[in-house]
Amino acid sequence: MLAPQGEAGFLAFSDLLTGYRQAAVLMLAHEAGIFAAVGREGCTGPELCAKVGWEQVYGERFLHCLCGLGLLRREEARYTLTPFSRTYLAPHAPHYQGQTLLFERQLHQSWQQLEATLTTGQRVFATVDKSPEALQQALALYLGAMDEAARIRAEELWTALPMSTPTGTILDLGAGSGAFLAAFLEQNPGWSGIFCDLPEVVASAGLHQRLAGVAERLAWCACNLLADEPSPLDAIEDRSCKLVLLSNLIHCQGPTETQLLLAKAAAKTAEHGTVVIHDFCTDTGWRGAVYDLHMMLNTYNGQAYSKEEIVAMATSCGLAHRDCIQLPSGSTALVLARKQEKPDGLLGH
């Protein structure tokens, strides 16, 4: 865990330096099936080592480490899951992060190219060409990982921004797994939604099944938001959506593309509608700054932006900054509306 800004103790330095060790222990424990093997009832050290195929003496040293990290609890001779593991790490967990862990493992290779990227001034790491089947599998893993985190952040976002307007349309640009859209529509039964993303995302296996509960109130817009040619987005009437969401979208693009995305979002926003930009910002703590490097390494020209940069780009599109909310899991929500207009429907804004 990274130290709070300004903390100068050696423990803070040590934790920052050795954070990779905790990540290695967490990933191995998950990949070995420790949390699944412990299950709801728990088991002894010898039983657990036998289940995952580890030598007992060394294996129990590893289990002791998991206890120290708060991932397991030992009561007499039995190991059981902690509340943290029961929430995020066990296969039956309500917010299981299994695909997120698998996806993060793949990112280790790109982070090994950090120095080379800084030296050349461009992205160095690139995945090899994949077969159509491999591409589909990679997309499914990506969407699955994004969905696991998005379900948690969607609950945080819509709790912080409840709607008082009983009806309306929400346009989700770059909707991804649909977690934010689904959570909003479930919370606001009088609203309809538009899912807008790339054609391959809209057609991905499992997406329509995940959104089956709100399918009757959902329209689909399969398009490339950055394309110059006419697209299905053009069929959505301008100024027809009371709420336009850009969640974890603008960090995938450079400033020119982001400016275009914000202009398209503004065009579809109703007269007294609201635009919500949910993302990581570089001036809201270390998470945003590290996320910017993640974009540097893993996208063509993506980057995280400061709140000031986002507001400046939005202002040039005729939008005014109304509020900024820091969500519990570390991301930021910027609330915008048309200049000189008060947004309609977001309580407290």
Image (cartoon, rainbow, N blue to C red):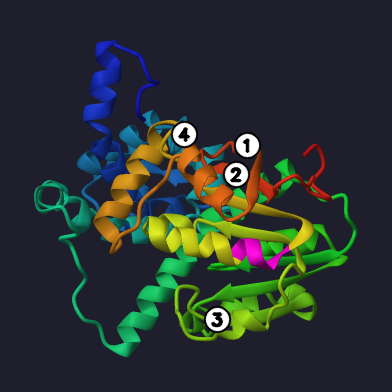
What's the amino acid at mark 2? Ala
What residue does disc 3 label? 202
Could you tell me how far apart the alpha carbons at marks 2 and 3 are, in whole angstroms?
25 Å
Amino acid marked by disc 4 = Arg
Amino acid at dot 1 = Ile
Mark number displayed over residue 73: 4
Q: How far apart are marks 4 and 1 (CA)?
A: 35 Å
Give, as a three-letter code, the residue at label 3: Val
Q: Name the residue rendered at 33%, 81% in the picture.
A: 135
State the extent of the magenta-drawn residues as a range. Answer: 265-269
Residue appearing at x 34%, y 87% in the figure = 133
* Residue 184, quarter of the rendered image: bottom right
* Residue positioned 28% across, 25% down in the render: 15
Taking depth in this image into account, of 180 and 14 the one nearest to the observer is: 180
- Give the vertical position of 225 relative to 245 (above or below): below
Disc 1 on helix, strand or loop?
strand
112 lies above or below 282: below
